[in-house]
Amino acid sequence: MVTCYDASFASVISRTDVDCLLVGDSLGMVVQGHSSTLPVTMDEIIYHTKAVKRGAPGKYLIADLPFLSYQTSLIDGIQSAGRLLKETNADAVKLEGADKESITLVKRLVEIGIPVMGHLGLTPQSYQTLGGYKVQGKDPESAEKMLKDSLALQDAGAFGIVLEMIPETLGQEISQNISIPTIGIGAGRYTDGQVLVIYDLLGINPDFTPKFLKKYADLGNLILTSLNSYHKEVVDKNFPGENNVF
Ligand code: KIV
């Protein structure tokens, strides 16, 4: 799974073997330039999800429920999730956490016919109460709680769970103890699948180098040198060339 936010990237991804696209609220950081995902709105997620669906109509598409679109009440959660599916034609929604209210919401959404993916570990919408963007589940109590939360999400009907920034041993334990797929980001080698933010795996930002990330390209530098070549050729009157004119 990779994240995706626009039709051009979606169109490239639609020609790859990648199984699944996530319109993550990470767009608040990598597209909008915020320092967290909290400012992202429902309208913005809907806007980006529609664009991705147009670019990759055949890929399985999950859209994030943004901060405060589902935490305020059961009704708000149902309306937000329903709106996401109705307006974007996404296949499923993802929500963070597994408190009592979230589990009730997951159950109800699944009953209504809305597929739900859970998200445990470092849940970025709660980064302030988690003490920042830190590895979660390091002590036995929080590890035990995360395993219980995973089982509760499974029992509520979630079809899969993203596990973010947890010890590899915990990622493995959870994956072995639940029957729905786990998709890891910084959760080690033993989850059923992996997810990365597309700009991160393509190396757009040379300064972003967390341990869990592997960069499969150096697009940031490629874009930089390409733009400087373009600029130089325009200044030197080498572009447009003979082949580019009417
Ligand atoms: O918002 C997001 O992109 C995510 C992934 C990193 C899992 O939740």
Image (cartoon, rainbow, N blue to C red):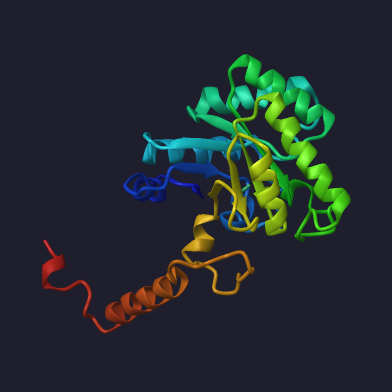
Image location of residue 138, percent across then percent down: 81, 58
Q: Find the residue positioned furthest to the bottom.
A: 236
22 left or right, relative to 129: left
Residue depicted at 60% across the width and 71% down the height: 209
Residue 77 seen anywhere in this rendered image of the structure: no
Name the foreground residue: 61 vs 165: 165
On the image, which quarter does residue 100 sit in? Answer: top right
Residue depicted at 66% across the width and 48% down the height: 163
Residue depicted at 11% across the width and 61% down the height: 246
Name the foreground residue: 43 vs 6: 6
Residue depicted at 54% across the width and 62% down the height: 200
Residue 50 seen anywhere in this rendered image of the structure: yes
Q: Say if 243 sits above or below 93 in the image.
A: below
Q: Find the residue positioned furthest to the top.
A: 112
Image location of residue 149, percent across then percent down: 77, 37
Name the foreground residue: 43 vs 221: 221
